[in-house]
Structure formats: C-alpha cells, structure tokens
Amino acid sequence: MQCTYEEIASVLGISKRRFIDHLDREPRLREIVEEGREYGRASIRRAQFKLLNDGNATMAIWLGKQYLGQRDQVDSQVTGAEGGPIEITLTELLAQIKVERERIAAKAKP
C-alpha cells in the first residue's frame, strides 16, 4: 500500500517518532518494512505494464517518458508580417514599454 511512516505509526497507535525509534533499534523491522515497500513498488510496476500491454496509450506514453527518456516537444516560432522577421524600432519599443508600465500602475491603484 506504500504507507508512509506516519501512516504506519497511526495504524499502530504510536507516534511517528516512536515508530522511527523502533526502526532504528530493530534492524529486522526496518528490513520487513523496506521489503514490503519493494513488493508494493513491484506491484505498481506490474499493474502499469499490464495497462500498457492491454493497449492503454496513456500508460505507454508515460512509461516511455519514465524509462526511455521520451518527451513532448513543442516547437514554436514567432514571426512578423507574412512570416518575416519582427521589425520594431527602439522608439516603438520604448513607447510600448511606457504604455505597459502605465497600465500596470493603473491596475495597482486602489
């Protein structure tokens, strides 16, 4: 179930700190907890791969990203008129900055 130490302690009716103290004093208890976590992770992985094998495209994409380094790639390009470069003079840019500053200042006033 992949419970946290806090959740395990709660089920046992003790504090998290006390549970951790038990883990520190009892190496076999720590081994048992870690073995349970490993088993839980393997169960999750098994369920994920079953979804993949059953044709779940979303799981296929997710597993590809996790294990194969696949990623979404978004290419974007901003252009000016008719696909050409964006042309702006320094004077125009400064005027636009001034207008934007004034707009922000006006919004900030109560």
Image (cartoon, rainbow, N blue to C red):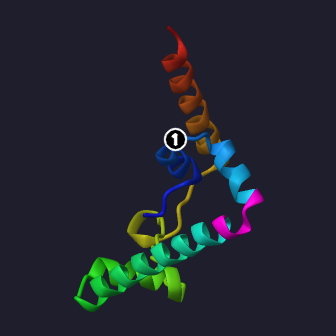
Instruction: Indicate whether 102 appears above or below 83.
Output: above
Assign the N terminus to one quadrant of the image: bottom left
**At 50% from the left edge and 8% from the top edge, which residue is drawn?**
110
Dominant secondary structure, magenta:
helix
* Residue that mark 1 sits on: 13
Q: Residue furthest top?
A: 110
Foreground of the two, 82 or 28? 28
Instruction: Indicate whether 78 appears above or below 8.
Output: below
**At label 1, which amino acid type do we have?**
Gly
Q: Position of residue 20 (x, y in %)?
A: 69, 51
**Relative to 25, is 108 on the left or the right?**
left
Instruction: Indicate whether 22 appears above or below 52.
Output: above
**Which range is magenta?**
25-29
**At 56% from the left edge and 38% from the top edge, which residue is drawn?**
96
Q: Residue furthest right?
A: 25
Q: Is residue 28 magenta?
A: yes
Query: Which type of secondary structure does the marked residue at label 1 adopt?
Result: loop
Tell me which corner region of the image, top left, top right, bottom left or bottom right, holds residue 18. Answer: top right
**At 55% from the left edge and 47% from the top edge, which residue is drawn?**
9
Foreground of the two, 30 or 91? 30
Foreground of the two, 94 or 76? 76
Q: Position of residue 34 (x, y in %)?
A: 60, 70
Q: Position of residue 87 (x, y in %)?
A: 55, 59
Q: Residue furthest bottom?
A: 53
Q: Residue furthest left?
A: 54
Tell me which corner region of the image, top left, top right, bottom left or bottom right, holds residue 93. Answer: top right
* Visible residue check, residue 88: yes
Crowd around label 1: few <14 · some 14–19 · many ≥20 (10 Å): few
**Relative to 88, is 84 on the left or the right?**
left
**At 72% from the left edge and 62% from the top edge, which residue is drawn?**
26
**Relative to 60, is 11 on the left or the right?**
right
Foreground of the two, 29 or 7? 29
